[in-house]
Image (cartoon, rainbow, N blue to C red):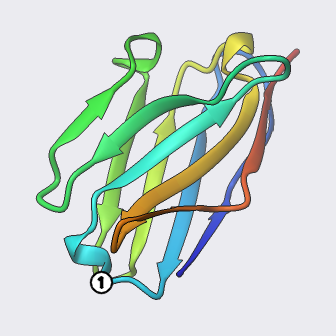
Amino acid sequence: VQLQASGGGLVQPGGSLRLSCAASGIIFRLNAMRWHRQAPGKQRELVATITSTGSTNYTDSVKGRFTISRDNIKRTMYLHMNSLKPEDTAVYFCATHYRGRAYWGQGTQVTVSS
């Protein structure tokens, strides 16, 4: 199982970014997927989830600004991030469970700063 996250970068406050997570080694369309993030000195937190049927859930701090989505044909999950704030600065990880195990991508850095 491999999860490859990409799309991070430096963006000004109020800006937008789209993260991608390409998956292999799993039956992607059957798997719920998640985005987590970890800011310096803080614990990793769950940001958003999307089920195999497309239902979504978000942590309160990103509701209305972030959108999680998936393309089962491309076996890729996305996180569209709008109205970014400095407190969104973190390493973002994609993750899933498969056959009883958790799998994590390598993380992509998002920095929101002027």
At label 1, the amino acid type is: Ile
Image height of 51 relative to 92, above or below? below
The residue positioned 50% from the left and 56% from the top of the image is 95
**In the drawing, does residue 30 fall left or right of residue 46?**
left
Relative side of 108 to 81, left or right? right
In this view of the protein, which residue sits in the foreground, 109 or 25? 25
Q: Quadrant of residue 74?
A: bottom left
Q: Taking 73 as reference, is 90 above or below it? A: above
Q: Which residue is pictured at 39% across the width and 36% down the height?
A: 48
Q: Which residue is mark 1?
A: 27
Q: In x, y percent, where is residue 47?
A: 47, 31
Q: Position of residue 110 (x, y in %)?
A: 75, 36
For residue 86, above or below residue 112: above
Tell which residue pokes out farthest to the front in this image.
100
Quarter holding the C terminus is top right
Work out which residue is located at the far bottom of the displayed protein and give it. Answer: 25
**Residue occupying the point 74% across, 18% down:** 42
Image position, residue 103 (x, y; %): 53, 64
Q: Position of residue 4 (x, y in %)?
A: 64, 70
Q: Please name whichever residue, 21 or 36, is drawn nearer the observer in this view of the structure.
A: 36
Which residue occupies the foreground of this view, 101 or 114? 101
* Residue positioned 76% across, 24% down in the render: 39
Quadrant of residue 66 within the rendered picture: top left
Label 1 SS: loop
